[in-house]
Image (spheres, grey):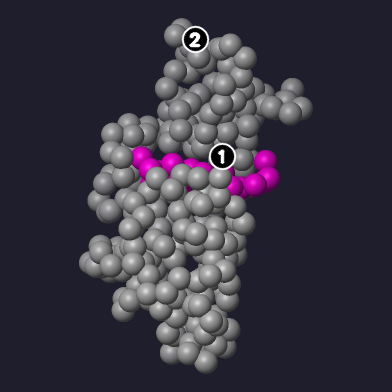
Amino acid sequence: MSLYRDEGVVLRTQKLGEADRIITILTKRTGKVRGVAKGIRRTTSRFGARLEPFTHVDLQLHAGRSLDVITQAETLHPYGQAIVRDYARYTAGMAMLETADRLAAAEKEPALRLFLLLVGGLRTLAEGAHEPRLVLDAFLLRSLAVAGYAPALTACARCGGEAVQAFAIAAGGAVCGACRPPGAAVPAPGTLELMNALLRGDWATADGSEPRQRSECSGFVARYLQWHLEHGIRSLRHVERDWPLRRAEPDAAPAYGAHG
């Protein structure tokens, strides 16, 4: 087996046998990796809390046929320490990890931009400078953009016109009155501006947004994400989900995880 080293963020873990765990990690250079941490469930394990979700770690692994073997793990940033103490941060963080896992569908395909987005999102979430729901929506929008699914927000997704009036998920985002399909949602004033601010990293605008705009934004982002993933992000169902929509799209997936 060949030995390699990489840094990554732990996405999830699952038990293997009596003492081992399979650790799924999004790494900086290799992409998504599944590795076995032998003996990690024993109290004497040298890995301990280093391989828990949210942790940014430096790893050494042996490449295997189906699963790699984690031989060393050193904590770079223990983001989970701050995130797990707050329910809003925790649920937002879990949705971020699950989304990264889903978007990096193939193992060992480099996903540097997604990795950097995840590290930045978890850092921002742990620092607590912004509302967790805003941090989550910013991560989701930017991750969709990296995957090639960025929604149209400032011009009509169909004709390119600037007089947008509605948000149509199946059409690709904002649409003008002439291109608006039946059932398209009509956002409150400022909602699309908030979505664009989150996509661009304009936190001054995002932090100054109103509760109605934030709720509506979360609904649009969740529905748009799940439309492109075709299956629900289970963790989203635990995130705050009270948003008023003037009119919901009948063809959109119900927001915040309706799929079992």
Horizontal side, residue 43 vs residue 209: left or right: right
Give the magenta range: 90-109
Q: Which mark is residue 27?
A: 1
Q: CA distance from mark 2 to mark 1?
A: 25 Å
Residue 212: % across, % down: 28, 67
Percent x, y of residue 247: 42, 74
Dot 1: element: strand
What residue is drawn where x is 62% and y is 57%?
230
Residue 184 seen in the current view: yes
Q: Main secondary structure of the magenta part?
A: helix
The residue to which callout 2 is attached is: 42
Q: How many marks?
A: 2
- Where does residue 47 sit, x and y in percent of width and height? 48, 18
Image position of 161 with respect to 9: above or below: below
SS type, badge 2: loop
Q: Nearer the viewer, residue 149 or 191?
A: 191
Q: Nearer the viewer, residue 120 or 214?
A: 214
Residue type at mark 1 is: Thr
